[in-house]
Structures are given as structure tokens and as C-alpha cells.
Image (cartoon, grey):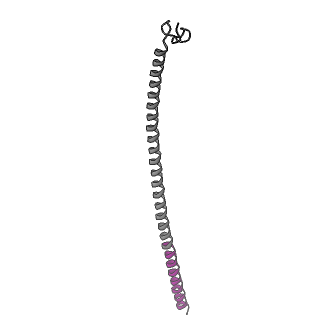
């Protein structure tokens, strides 16, 4: 055998020695197929990572919008509570003033009745 052939134990080829040129061509074809598969997997992975990144960004944007909406609602609620407290204080002051007027009226009538 020449130096360009290997024994079947080293390189199997239907039980006959396989020439180095055929072996190399097969390896190169296999290498090409592997590289193509790696490129396809890489593209698929890039697409999936891109889609996941977009979903995360979208979720973060939605979360920021929700946080802003909550903040605005809190501000509105604070204003409404503040106004309600002001009205309650005014009503209480008016009630105190009316009670005071009624007491004065009652006292003056009692004095008139007693005099």
C-alpha cells in the first residue's frame, strides 16, 4: 500500500482502504455541513435573543407607564383627600359657629325668660 491509503481499521470505507483524498473530501464536506448548522443555530439564537430583548424592553416600557399612571393617580388622590379635608374643616368650623350662635340665642332667650 502507498502512503496515501490507510488500513480499514483506521478509516472504514465499506471494508476497503479509503484514499486520503476521499477521506479529506468527506471531512471537508462534513466540516461545511457543521459550519452551516452552526451558522443556522447562531441566526436562530440571535433572532430569539432579539425577540426576548424586545419583549423585555416592551415589558419595562409598560412597567414604566404603569408606574407613571400610579404616580399620577396618587397625586390626584392626594389632591382629592386634601380638598375633602379642607371641606370637612370648613364644615366643622361652620358647625361650631352655628352652635355658638345657637348657644348665644338660647342664653339670651333664657335670660329674657328669667328676667
> Toward the viewer: 71 or 47?
47
Name the residue: 52% across, 78% down. 93
Between residue 91 and residue 29, name the one nearer to us.
29
Camera-side residue of 24 and 67: 24
Residue that protrudes farthest toward the bottom in the picture: 115
Q: Is residue 32 above or below residue 80?
A: above
- What segment carries the magenta color? 87-115
The spot of residue 114 in percent (x, y) is 56, 90
Residue 23 in percent (x, y) is at 48, 16
- How many discs appear? 0
Q: Residue drawn 48% across and 69% down?
A: 84
Task: Residue 35: say if magenta.
Answer: no
Q: Residue at x 56, y 11 (%)?
A: 10
- Left/right of residue 44 with respect to residue 7 in the rendered view: left
Outermost residue, front side: 2
Q: Residue 15 in the image: x percent, y percent?
A: 50, 6
**Is residue 106 shown in magenta?**
yes
Q: Quadrant of the C terminus?
A: bottom right
Nearer-the-camera pick, 84 or 36 = 36
Depicted 47 relative to depicted 22: above or below: below
The main secondary structure of the magenta stretch is: helix
Percent from the top left, x then y, of residue 35?
46, 28
Amino acid at each position: 500500500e502507498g502512503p496515501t491509503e490507510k488500513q480499514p481499521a483506521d478509516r472504514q470505507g465499506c471494508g476497503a482502504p479509503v484514499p486520503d483524498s476521499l477521506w479529506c473530501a468527506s471531512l471537508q464536506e462534513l466540516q461545511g455541513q457543521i459550519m452551516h448548522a452552526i451558522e443556522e443555530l447562531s441566526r436562530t439564537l440571535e433572532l430569539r435573543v432579539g425577540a426576548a430583548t424586545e419583549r423585555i424592553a416592551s415589558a419595562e416600557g409598560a412597567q414604566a407607564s404603569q408606574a407613571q399612571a400610579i404616580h399620577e393617580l396618587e397625586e390626584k388622590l392626594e389632591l382629592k383627600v386634601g380638598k375633602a379635608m379642607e371641606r370637612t374643616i370648613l364644615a366643622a368650623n361652620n358647625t361650631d359657629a352655628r352652635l355658638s350662635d345657637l348657644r348665644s340665642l338660647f342664653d339670651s332667650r333664657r335670660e329674657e325668660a328669667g328676667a
